[in-house]
C-alpha cells in the first residue's frame, strides 16, 4: 500500500532507499523504483535505542529527506538521530520534535494507499494503485523447485495476523478447494501452518495431492513468485491480498470485521465479498465493520455466512474476465 507513494517520489526525481524489517523487505525489492533496501534488525516491541542509534550513525549524511510512514515514536527516531534535514510524517506518539513536516491525521479512516500517498504533498491520490514486478527468471526458478507450472494452480491465503474476526472459516476454504478444477497452494506464515493443515486434510482426502500446504516453508520472495504466477487467489483482508492486487492477479478478497473502504485490494481483477455491503443479506450486519480481533457478539456472521459457492462464483467471474 506504500508503493504508489514511492512511485510518485521516484517520478519527480527522488532516489529511494527503503528501510524495512526483514519480513517485508522482499516486497520492496519487487518495486523497480526502489534503488536500495536497508533491512532493520528490530524485534517487535521496545524502543531499541542503541540499535537505532547504530544504524543512524551508519547512514548519517546520506539522505536529504525521510518519509516516516508508521505513526509510532520509534519509527521517527532513527531519521532524527541520523540528522536527516527533512523528516516528513503524520502527527503521532509525541513525536513533534522528531519530524520537521507534520500532516494531521484524518478524523475518519481513509483508504490506506491515499493515506500514505498524501505524504508526497501531491493531489490526485484517488488514481493510485499499487504495482509489483517479479522477474521471469525468479518465478521460473521457484516454480521449477516446487514442481508447479505457471497458471496451473490457485493460491489461497487463509490467514490474517490480526485475528479470527478477519479469517474466513477453514472448512469453507476446504469446500472451495474441493470444488475447483486445479490444485490449490496454501500460503502463510509458520503460525498459520496448522490452519492450512486443517484445510489441506479434507481436500487431499477427496482429491489426493491436490492441496499443497506451503505455510511456513516458503520465503516471502517465493510466496510473491507463487502468487504472481497463479491462475487466481482467494484471501482474507491481509498483506498477501494486497500482493495479489499489485500483481494484477484475478482474486477474491473476503472481508469480515474490517472494511474494504479502508484497505481495499486496488485491482480491476479483484472481487470483494463483504456482507455489510449486500442489501439482500438479512438481518443486516449493523455491527460491521467492528475492527475487532474476535467477534464481540460471538457469531462471526460476517464471515461464516459467506458460502464457498459464492466465492467460487466470484473467482470464476474474475478469472474468466482476465
Image (cartoon, rainbow, N blue to C red):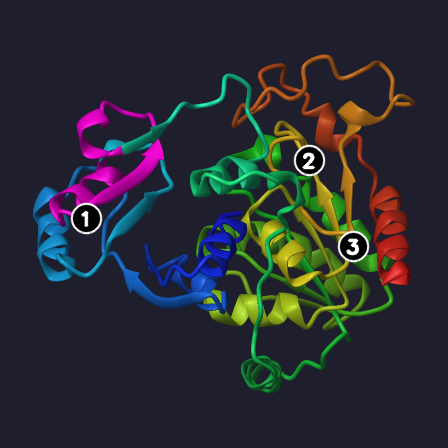
Residue 50 lies within the magenta run: no
Q: For the point 56% across and 66% down, which residue is it?
A: 224
Q: Residue 90: say if magenta.
A: yes
CB atoms of marks 2 and 3 within 8 Å:
no
Image mark for residue 255? 2
Q: Label 1: which residue? A: 84
x, y percent for residue 309: 88, 45
Residue 69 in the figure: left or right of residue 289: left
Q: Residue at x 79, y 28 (%)?
A: 275
- Judging depth in this view, the residue of 134 and 294 nearest the camera is 134
Query: Marks 3 and 1, how far apart in space?
Result: 40 Å
SS of the residue at dot 3?
loop
Question: Which is more foreground, mark 2 or mark 1?
Answer: 1
Is disc 2 surrounded by few (<14), some (14 to 19) or many (20+) residues within 10 Å? many
**Which of these two is toward me, 21 or 2?**
2
Task: Please give left or right for residue 239 compared with residue 182 in the image.
Answer: left
The answer to whether residue 215 is above or below residue 290 is below
Residue assigned mark 3: 269
Q: Nearer the viewer, mark 3 or mark 1?
A: 1
What residue range appears in magenta?
74-100
Q: Position of residue 195 (x, y in %)?
A: 57, 49
Q: Can you see residue 90?
A: yes
Amino acid at each position: 500500500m506504500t508503493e504508489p507513494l514511492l512511485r510518485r517520489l521516484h517520478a519527480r526525481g527522488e532516489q529511494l532507499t527503503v528501510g524495512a524489517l526483514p519480513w517485508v523487505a522482499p516486497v520492496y525489492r519487487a518495486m523497480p523504483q526502489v534503488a536500495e533496501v536497508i533491512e532493520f534488525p528490530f524485534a517487535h516491541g521496545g524502543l531499541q535505542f542503541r540499535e537505532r542509534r547504530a544504524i543512524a550513525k551508519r547512514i548519517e549524511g546520506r539522505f536529504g529527506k525521510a518519509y516516516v510512514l508508521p505513526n509510532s515514536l520509534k519509527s521517527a527516531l532513527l531519521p532524527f538521530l541520523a540528522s536527516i534535514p527533512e523528516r516528513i510524517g503524520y502527527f503521532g506518539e509525541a513525536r513533534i520534535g522528531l519530524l520537521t513536516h507534520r500532516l494531521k491525521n484524518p478524523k475518519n479512516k481513509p483508504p490506506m494507499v491515499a493515506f500514505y500517498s498524501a505524504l508526497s504533498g501531491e493531489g490526485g491520490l484517488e488514481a493510485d494503485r499499487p504495482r509489483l514486478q517479479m522477474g521471469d527468471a525468479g518465478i521460473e526458478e521457484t516454480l521449477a523447485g516446487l514442481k508447479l507450472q505457471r497458471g496451473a494452480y490457485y493460491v489461497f491465503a487463509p490467514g490474517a495476523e490480526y485475528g479470527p474476526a478477519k479469517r474466513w472459516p477453514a472448512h469453507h476454504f476446504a469446500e472451495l478447494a474441493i470444488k475447483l478444477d486445479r490444485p490449490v497452494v496454501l500460503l502463510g506464515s509458520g503460525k498459520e501452518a496448522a490452519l492450512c493443515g486443517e484445510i489441506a486434510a479434507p481436500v487431499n482426502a477427496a482429491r489426493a495431492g491436490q492441496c499443497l500446504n506451503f505455510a511456513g516453508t516458503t520465503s516471502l520472495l517465493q510466496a510473491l513468485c507463487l502468487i504472481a504466477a497463479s491462475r487466481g487467489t482467494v484471501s482474507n483482508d491481509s498483506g498477501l491480498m494486497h500482493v495479489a492486487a499489485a500483481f494484477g492477479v484475478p482474486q477474491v478478497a473476503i472481508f469480515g470485521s474490517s472494511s474494504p473502504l479502508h484497505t481495499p485490494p486496488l485491482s480491476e481483477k479483484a472481487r470483494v465479498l463483504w456482507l455489510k455491503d449486500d442489501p439482500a443479506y438479512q438481518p443486516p450486519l449493523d455491527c460491521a465493520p467492528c475492527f475487532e480481533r474476535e467477534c464481540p457478539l460471538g457469531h462471526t456472521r460476517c464471515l461464516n455466512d459467506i458460502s464457498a459457492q459464492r466465492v467460487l462464483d466470484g473467482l470464476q467471474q474474475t478469472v474468466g474476465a482476465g
